Image (cartoon, grey):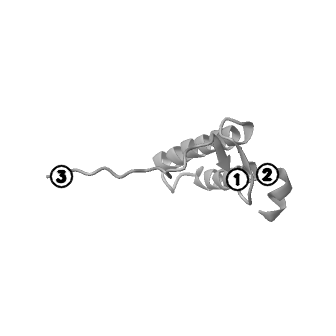
Amino acid sequence: MVVTRERVYTRVGDDGTTGLFYGGRVAKDSSLPRAYGAVDEAQAVLGLVRAELGRENELNDALVHIMRDLWVLMAELATLPENRHKL
C-alpha cells in the first residue's frame, strides 16, 4: 500500500503577516491577532462548558448570548478600525 501525503502550503512563503477583514495586513504577533485569538480561546471554553451542561441547563441561553457577543468582538478585532463600519 502506498501512502501519500497532502502538502499544505501556498508555495509563496510566509511573510509573517495575516490578513484582516475588508483588507489590511498586520504582523501575526501583533496585538490584534493576539486579542482575537484570546477571545477565540474563551469562546471555545464556553462551548465546552455548554456541551457539558447540556441544552436544558438554565445557563444555556446566557452562554449562547455571550458566545454570540464574542463572535462580534472577534470580527471587530479582526478588522482595521477604519473598516469596522463595514461589519
Q: CA distance from mark 2 to mark 3?
A: 47 Å
Element class at badge 3: loop
Give the x, y percent position of residue 83: 82, 58
Q: Residue at x 58, y 53 (%)?
A: 60
Along the viewing direction, whichever of 21 and 38 lies nearer the viewer: 21
Q: Residue at x 73, y 42 (%)?
A: 32
Of the two numbered discs 1 and 3 in the rendering, the one whose residue sits closer to the viewer: 3
**Disc 1 residue type?**
Leu
Element class at badge 2: loop
Q: Quadrant of residue 31?
A: top right
Element class at badge 1: loop
Give the x, y percent position of residue 50: 53, 49
**Disc 2 residue type?**
Leu
Q: CA distance from mark 1 to mark 3?
A: 40 Å
Q: Are marks 2 and 1 in contact (CB under 8 Å)?
A: yes
The residue labelled by disc 1 is 20
The residue labelled by disc 2 is 80
Q: Residue at x 71, y 55 (%)?
A: 72
Sequence-first tag of 2 and 1: 1
Q: Residue furthest bottom?
A: 86
Q: Quadrant of residue 87?
A: bottom right
Q: Is residue 3 above or below residue 34?
A: below
The residue labelled by disc 3 is 2
Q: CA distance from mark 2 to mark 1?
A: 7 Å
